């Protein structure tokens, strides 16, 4: 964390925003959608969230204990990872899905690459994709006590009509945390107002996604269709909470716009032309892999370099 | 240790072609979806490797240095063709499972690497056991990877149902028990990388423990040609740029000194 070996010389800006403060704010911002998910899907969802968070935190603790490293679970980053992963699981998933996902996210995606700040991929999304490929039938089974049948996105893909109002409020089938657009946007507002995230990545992501849908969706500028695409699936959760992950997004301003546009286009391609109805998580981890390249081509010129010589 | 056991030990453990030298990754990752496939691929390669090592060692004074690579390839390709026809005739299921990777044994860098760095410079008997050792090391590695992938990805081992899955539950007191859900990622490509990485780490740990118990791992001659620049062996402690860490002057020592 506070790896101060490479700091430049003074003056330094002091900030009260520490890693644990930021992570705590993210947890608080995720609470509305978590609570809505628990209200929506019942006690199964609560249990799954608790198990997943416990497994990520425990994995980080045990790994650092075994490797004789500094214990970093008090920075809440493992809690954020666990919470995000749990919000990406269907409520019907058995308890061990949360455990395997939590262990994979922390151990393989985060710790083996050097811990927080070093991981090349969003741990929660890496684990989600691992689970999605490993246990496809469990991870795409959205039937539960409350809802049965296809998710709105799957219905949309097969050409059925969907109730957009239900999707915005969140009373639909889906993973625990993705259904309610209102709750996610409310949480995102907390993050934006406290300055934890800005609108560069989510804004360019959503705008480029809408442009892609209008151009290639085959429905033209159909407001109902576009709002259903925006509210459905994990797009909102991904755009505000996962694409903006400090570790795996580009640092440069233009790189962030580029990142957002790339994600929008990839999500559109996966959703419209892919075999599955949803593609946000694959789009984001694919974007994560390209982040070093995006930073390289958008590196700002140092003062005095480049430009015309007078 | 005499020459024969030394060669076998070298191929199986010290310079295991998969876990230490990281050679032949293409078949390693592609065909190890089950233990049987891994074993079949490994043994096929082992036979080709042994026979080609013997022939190349026999011809090592006849083959002109300038055309040695084409000559090696011709010898290796002949044995691969023979193996391919034998497999097609007697083990058609394996032939179908391995597919294009049988002809591709020709370009497997383990075989060419052993021909170049050992068989073309050493007498017949050590070369033969070098081939057997390397081949067995390759088979062992591929079987391990295949077994882990098959076990985790399908709940089977060598084609037998081992873990109770929904398709093949255990019957305990008449009740069906199926607690294992296969993680199909392990049969797919990413699983190959996961398993290879974990097994390589495990092998490194075993090797390091052996060194800690002061078993001298460096005394085993590795068929070193004293030319570190064109050497592909990663397990060698005598590489010139590793001599005094990464900062040692490059190109100075070339590994020529007495070891």
Image: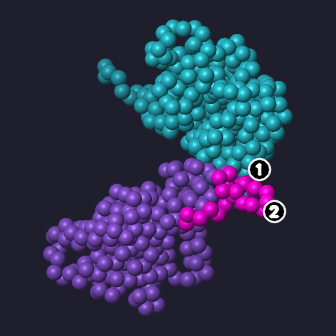
Q: Residue furthest right?
A: A43
3D distance between C-alphas at marks 2 and 1 = 36 Å
**Badge 1 density bin: few <14, some 14–19, many ≥20, Cα 10 Å:** some
Q: Residue furthest front?
A: B174
**Closer-to-camera residue (A193/A157):** A157
Q: Which residue is tagged 1?
A: A58
Name the residue: 42% across, 72% down: B43
Residue B210 vs A225, above or below: the answer is below
Name the residue: 41% across, 88% down: B4
Name the residue: 29% across, 81% down: B54
Residue B159 in the image, given as x and y percentages of width and height? 55, 63
Location of the N terminus of chain A by quadrant is: top right
Any idea which chain is the purple one in this picture? B
Q: Main secondary structure of the magenta part?
A: loop
Residue A146 is drawn in which quadrant?
A: top right
Residue B147 in the image, given as x and y percentages of width and height? 56, 64
Residue B54 vs A52, above or below: the answer is below
Indicate which disc residue B173 carries. 2
**Badge 2 density bin: few <14, some 14–19, many ≥20, Cα 10 Å:** few
Q: Is residue B185 left or right of residue B239?
A: right
Look at chain A in the picture and name its colour. cyan
Does residue A25 appear in this view?
Answer: no
Residue A191 in the image, given as x and y percentages of width and height? 71, 23
Tell me, yes or no, whether the highlighted magenta stretch contains residue B148. no
Location of the C terminus of chain A by quadrant is: top left
2 vs 1, front mark = 2
Looking at the rendering, the stretch of residues picked out in magenta corresponds to B158-180
Q: Are marks 2 and 1 on the same chain?
A: no
């Amino acid at each position: 964390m506070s790896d101060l070996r490479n700091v430049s010389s003074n003056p330094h800006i002091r900030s009260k925003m520490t890693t644990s403060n930021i992570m705590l704010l993210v947890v608080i911002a995720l609470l509305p959608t978590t609570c809505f998910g628990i209200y929506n899907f019942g006690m199964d969802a609560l249990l799954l969230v608790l198990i997943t968070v416990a497994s990520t935190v425990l994995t980080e603790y045990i790994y650092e204990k075994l490797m004789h490293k500094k214990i970093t679970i008090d920075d809440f980053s493992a809690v954020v990872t666990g919470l995000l992963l749990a919000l990406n699981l269907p409520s019907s998933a058995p308890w061990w899905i949360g455990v395997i996902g939590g262990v994979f996210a922390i151990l393989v995606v985060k710790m083996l690459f050097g811990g927080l700040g070093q991981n090349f991929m969003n741990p929660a999304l890496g684990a989600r994709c691992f689970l999605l490929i490993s246990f496809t039938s469990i991870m795409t089974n959205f039937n539960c006590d409350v809802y049965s049948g296809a998710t709105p996105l799957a219905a949309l893909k097969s050409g059925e009509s969907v109730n957009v109002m239900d999707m915005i409020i969140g009373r639909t089938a889906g993973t625990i945390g993705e259904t309610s657009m209102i709750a996610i946007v409310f949480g995102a507002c907390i993050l934006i107002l406290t300055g934890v995230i800005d609108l560069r990545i989510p804004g360019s992501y959503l705008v480029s996604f809408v442009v892609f849908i209008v151009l290639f969706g085959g429905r033209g500028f159909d407001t109902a269709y576009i709002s259903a695409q925006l509210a459905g699936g994990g797009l909102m959760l991904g755009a505000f909470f996962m694409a903006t992950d400090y570790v795996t997004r580009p640092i440069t301003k233009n790189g962030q716009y580029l990142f957002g546009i790339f994600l929008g286009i990839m999500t559109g391609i996966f959703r419209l032309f892919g075999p599955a109805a949803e593609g946000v998580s694959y789009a984001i981890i694919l974007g994560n892999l390209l982040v070093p390249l995006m930073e390289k081509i958008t590196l700002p010129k140092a003062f005095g370099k480049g430009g015309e010589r007078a | 240790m005499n020459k024969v056991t030394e060669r076998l030990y070298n191929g199986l453990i010290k310079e295991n072609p998969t876990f230490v030298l990281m050679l032949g990754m293409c078949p390693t990752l592609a065909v190890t979806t089950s233990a049987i496939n891994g074993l079949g691929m490994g043994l096929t390669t082992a036979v080709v490797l042994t026979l080609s090592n013997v022939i190349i060692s026999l011809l090592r004074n006849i083959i002109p240095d300038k055309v040695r690579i084409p000559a090696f390839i011709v010898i290796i390709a002949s044995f691969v063709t023979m193996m391919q026809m034998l497999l097609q005739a007697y083990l058609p299921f394996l032939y179908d499972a391995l597919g294009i990777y049988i002809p591709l044994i020709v370009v497997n860098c383990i075989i060419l690497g052993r021909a170049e760095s050992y068989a073309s410079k050493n007498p017949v008997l050590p070369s033969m056991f070098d081939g057997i050792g390397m081949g067995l090391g390759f088979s062992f590695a591929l079987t391990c990877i295949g077994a882990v992938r098959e076990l985790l990805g399908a709940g089977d081992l060598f084609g037998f149902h081992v873990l109770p899955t929904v398709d093949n539950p255990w019957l305990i007191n008449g009740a069906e028990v199926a607690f294992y859900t296969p993680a199909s990622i392990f049969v797919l490509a990413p699983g190959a990388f996961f398993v290879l990485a974990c097994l390589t780490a495990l092998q490194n740990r075993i090797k390091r423990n052996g060194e800690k118990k002061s078993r001298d791992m460096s005394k085993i001659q590795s068929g070193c040609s004293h030319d570190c620049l064109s050497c592909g062996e990663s397990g060698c402690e005598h590489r010139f740029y590793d001599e005094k860490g990464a900062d040692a002057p490059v190109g100075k020592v070339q590994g020529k000194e007495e070891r």
